[in-house]
Amino acid sequence: MSLKELEAEIKKLDLKDRATLAKWIVESLDDLSGAEIEALWVEEAERRLDEMEQGAVAGIPAEEALRKARNAIS
């Protein structure tokens, strides 16, 4: 299964299951060194920036993102 296919499947999960999966993934990173974790975050930030610069995704104001996040967990 490709990463794109995996992403599509994960998006089908409900919010609680995605949160559980995210927690498991983050916990699985505990075996990595600080430098490895930092490199992964840099890679992710660069990927997201590329998506924004290519117009694949649109940014939203921080206030809106925080409001959505708060609503999702309340």
Image (cartoon, rainbow, N blue to C red):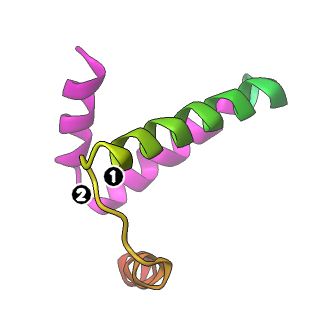
Question: What residue is at 54 percent from the left and 47 percent from the top?
Answer: 23
Q: Quadrant of residue 1?
A: top left
Helix, strand or loop at disc 2?
loop
Mark 2 vs 1: CB contact within 8 A: yes
Mark 2 = which residue?
A: 14
Tell me if 63 is positioned left or right of 7 in this view.
right
Q: Does dot 1 land on a helix, a strand or a loop? A: helix
Amino acid of disc 2: Asp
State the residue at coordinates (22%, 49%).
13
> Which residue occupies the foreground of this view, 45 or 72?
45
Task: Name the magenta segment's main secondary structure.
Answer: helix
- Residue placed farthest to the right in the image? 34
- Marker count (numbered): 2
18 on left or right of 5: right
Q: Position of residue 27 (x, y in %)?
A: 64, 38
- Which residue sits furthest front? 53
- Percent across and percent down for residue 38 are 73, 34
Instruction: Please report the residue visible at 36 percent of the width from the left and 64 percent of the height from the top.
Output: 59
- 73 relative to 25, above or below: below
Q: Is residue 33 left or right of residue 52?
A: right
State the quadrant of the C terminus: bottom left
Say above or below: 45 vs 43.
Answer: below
Magenta region includes residue 44: no
Write down the region rendered in magenta: 1-29
Crowdedness near tag 2: few (<14), some (14–19) or many (≥20) residues, C-alpha within 10 Å: few
Where does label 1 land, which residue? Answer: 17
Residue 42 image point, x, y percent: 63, 36
